[in-house]
Image (tube, rainbow, N blue to C red):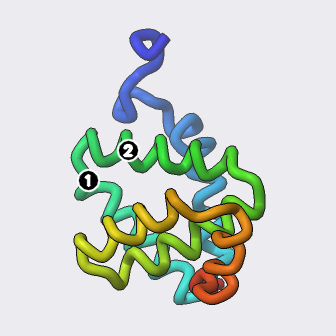
Amino acid sequence: ASAALPNWEQLTPAQRDALLAPLRDRWNGADAGQRQRMLSHGQRWQSMSPEERDKARRGLRRFEHMSPEQREQARALFGQMRTLSPAQRDALRERWADMTPEQRKEWVRENPPPVKPR
């Protein structure tokens, strides 16, 4: 199927516009902080290796299939992991794996996810 679809350079101007229109609308509706995040994310994506991009896509698909409670737990864990050393991350992963569902809920109450920027 991908062989039948042209590279970007072979798309018509109308096809390119149709692909970019949703992004243009998001950009135009965003405030300065949101625009900066969009630009930073785009730059980060460009710097990723193909393997890193695949890993990011798999993580996003996994996140999309989580329940709201699981998403909150993932956000809380991710928020904490960003502040820890590799050894501390491993220790938290092990502790998390041994926690009961009620213990996990309590941990999230004590370590809420970071506030999502708007």
Residue count near mark 2 (Cα–Cα under 10 Å), binned few <14, some 14–19, many ≥20: few
Q: Is residue 13 left or right of residue 92?
A: right
Q: Of callouts 2 and 1, which one flags the residue occurring earlier in the amino acid sequence?
A: 1
Tell me what residue is drawn at x 58 percent, y 38 percent. 14
Report the disc number at residue 55: 2
Kindly indicate the quadrant of the structure image that contains residue 62. top right
Front position in the image: 3 or 16: 3
Position of residue 108 measured from the top left corner of the image (x, y, whole percent):
64, 78
Marks 2/1: CA distance? 10 Å
Q: Name the amino acid type tagged 2.
A: Lys
Image quarter in which the C terminus is found: bottom right
In the rendered image of this protein, does residue 50 appear above or below residue 116? above
Could you tell whether 72 is left or right of 67 in the image?
left
Q: Is residue 30 above or below residue 74?
A: below
Q: Amino acid at mark 1?
A: Met
Nearer-the-camera pick, 59 or 70? 70
| Side of 86 where 83 appears, left or right | right
Instruction: Provide residue 34's location: percent of width, then percent of height.
Output: 56, 81
- Residue 117 in sight: no
The residue sitting at 41% across, 62% down in the picture is 94
Q: Residue at x 35, y 46 (%)?
A: 53
Q: Residue 39's image quarter? A: bottom left
Q: Classify residue 6 by image quadrant.
A: top left
Residue at position x 48%, y 71% in the image: 78
Q: Nearer the viewer, mark 2 or mark 1?
A: 2
Dot 1 falls on a residue whose secondary structure is loop
Vertical arrangement, residue 34 with respect to residue 77, above or below: below
Kindly identify which residue carries mark 1.
48
Label 1 neighbour load within 10 Å: few <14, some 14-19, many 20+: few
Mark 2 element type: helix
